[in-house]
Amino acid sequence: MAKKRRPQTKAATPQLVDGEVPVVGAREPCPCGSGRRYKACHGRAAAHAVTELVHRPFEGLPGEADWVALRELVPAATVELTLKDGLPEGVPVVKLATVLPMAWPALRRDNGEVLLGLQNDTASGDISRDLADTLQRALAAEPGSPVDTGRPAPDGPRLQDLLDLEAPFAPEVHSGFEFWVEDAEQAATGEVAASLERANSAAIPTARLSGVEGAYWCETPEKNHLRWVMTHPEERLLDALARLHAAGGSSLGDDTRLVGSFRAHGLTVPVWDLPSSMTSEDCEKPAAAFAERLAEALESTAPLTADERKARSGLANRQVTLS
């Protein structure tokens, strides 16, 4: 005798609430009633919102130029962050770090302190939203736990929503990655020790100039460099740099040369070659003087001369986009 078939029941379909379309599985029918699968209907917009590239993700944050520098240029640095709503119970401090051991996105130390890694691959096209999602999960993590990579909700908060936008942003550049270790007297062990040794051996000596915003000196075997993240609109900045270059005012002193620039996260970063004998302290006065010359050049609205157009073309041709 054949078995009786159980009556089939349809899975409950999420219902519209206040006109909003709930999230369902990609292959499930879209709750809007269109008859199409969710991924081909309202899921399309949600996926696009997550993957759409935000060209200037740190805009609106204090120290935008430094955020870009720490993301792209600086090997080892930390910054204490101030949350808009204050610190949760059990979290004594939140710090941004360029890199964390094992390339962890974030870490909740045994003492409750939270470290948020900046130089990591991100899941969406909005670094700010990715970092905010990681930060929220780190704040809720158990002490002594690393935080894995996640995927933020398309409408999730960004750093601009979580951080106090009136608080100062003051990076501390380190010569190595010893800040990974919670207790300065406690040696790193195991995988963390190996990761620390590798990171320290690859770190390029770097220093942040104190007199101007977003400028970082670094030392390399053959020559030193100054890489200066600038927040001026790109076209105006290139015009101003071209005016200075054509007039012989784009250098930072003897044996220094403006060699080009690159784009990173919506900002332009001019780069100078420096002699190996020129330290970060030696850059302070020339950089301050250059900032004054640049401010004057940015004010000019006169058409570029033939020499200035030639200089601008050279700068544009040597420009590279990192992100």
Image: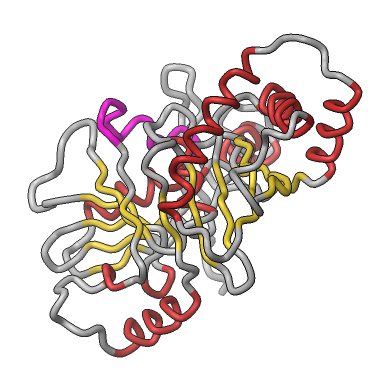
Q: Who's the residue at 30% across and 47% down the image? A: 136
Farthest-out residue, bottom:
190
In this view of the protein, can residue 127 be seen by the observer?
yes
Q: Position of residue 283 (x, y in %)?
A: 48, 48
* In-front residue for pair 10/44: 44
29 in relation to 198, above or below: above
Q: In this image, 48 relative to 118: left or right?
A: right
* In-front residue for pair 13/49: 49
Name the chief secondary structure element in magenta: loop
* In-front residue for pair 299/320: 299
Q: Who's the residue at 53% across and 30% down the image? A: 291
In this view of the protein, can residue 13 be seen by the observer?
no
Q: Who's the residue at 45% across and 67% down the image? A: 205
* In-front residue for pair 211/68: 211
Q: Quadrant of residue 50?
A: top right
Queried whether the magenta region covers residue 166, the answer comes back as yes
Q: In this image, 103 relative to 172: left or right?
A: right
Q: Who's the residue at 37% across and 73% down the image? A: 101
Q: Quadrant of residue 42?
A: top right
Q: Position of residue 267 (x, y in %)?
A: 60, 36
The range drawn in magenta is: 153-168
Farthest-out residue, top:
301
